[in-house]
Amino acid sequence: MGLSSSTAAGLLWVNSAKTTLDIDRPTNTTSLGTQVTFSSEANVLEFFLFSSSASTERGGMNRVKNVNQDLATISGFAPLPLWHTLGYHFCKWYPVSAEMLMERNANFTTYGFPVDVLWSDIEWAQQNNDPQGYEYFKFNPLNFTDQQITMMNTQIEAAGRSIVVIVDPHIKVANDYFVYANGMSLQN
């Protein structure tokens, strides 16, 4: 995106190969402007140029909005974030249980803390408190019984809050862990 006193311009460079962008500003005072070089290692050359003047066309939007409107028409409009993600969050690493989350939820309500989202760190998935036992998509049965999970969800929802469980980007290697077993079966 470039902006001058009278126009705005934008370039959308579409290429999935490794691409470099070099911006070179002149060092002497007699040269005007900036040289920009795009370089992609492979694939089809595909780019879109957008430009808009300071006129009041297109519903009176300014020139930057015009260029962004054109860009979004091609690339897609950014979705709005989930409403609860904009609120106040409580997140702390600590060995977690359904009882502890329900207690924190009740305390935030009792003491008037403006909390919208409770986060549960990865211990929710630590099976039987085994340090090597993280199995995501399964709650630790020692700290989260089915009855406790139902009660925890009900209480947090009734307080107008949401809960997020953290998932680290790794999967335990164990043939008896359904996520690992299903993933391995897809390779065959």
Image: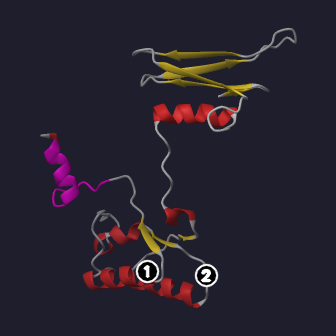
As drawn, the label of residue 113 is 2
Q: Quadrant of residue 36?
A: top right
Report the disc number at residue 71. Answer: none
Figure check: 165 above or below 39: below
Quarter holding the N terminus is top right
Whether the magenta-drawn stretch holds residue 125 is answered as no
Q: Residue at x 71, y 29 (%)?
A: 55
- Looking at the rendered structure, the kind of residue marked 1 is Ile
Mark 1 burial class by Cα count in 10 Å: few <14, some 14-19, many 20+? many
Specify whether 181 is left or right of 80.
left
122 and 113: which one is in front?
113
Tag on residue 156?
Answer: 1
What amino acid is labelled 2 in the image? Phe
Measured as percent of width and height from the top left, residue 144 is found at 32, 79
Q: Secondary structure at mark 2?
A: loop
Contact between labelled residues 1 and 2, with CB atoms less than 8 Å apart: no
> Is 32 above or below relative to 64?
above
The image quarter containing residue 164 is bottom left
**Depth check, front residue: 66 or 140:** 66
Residue range highlighted in magenta: 171-186
Q: Is residue 99 above or below residue 1?
A: below
Q: How many marks?
A: 2
Q: Which residue occupies the foreground of this view, 41 or 75?
A: 75
Between the residue at mark 2 and the residue at mark 1, the CA separation in whole angstroms equals 14 Å
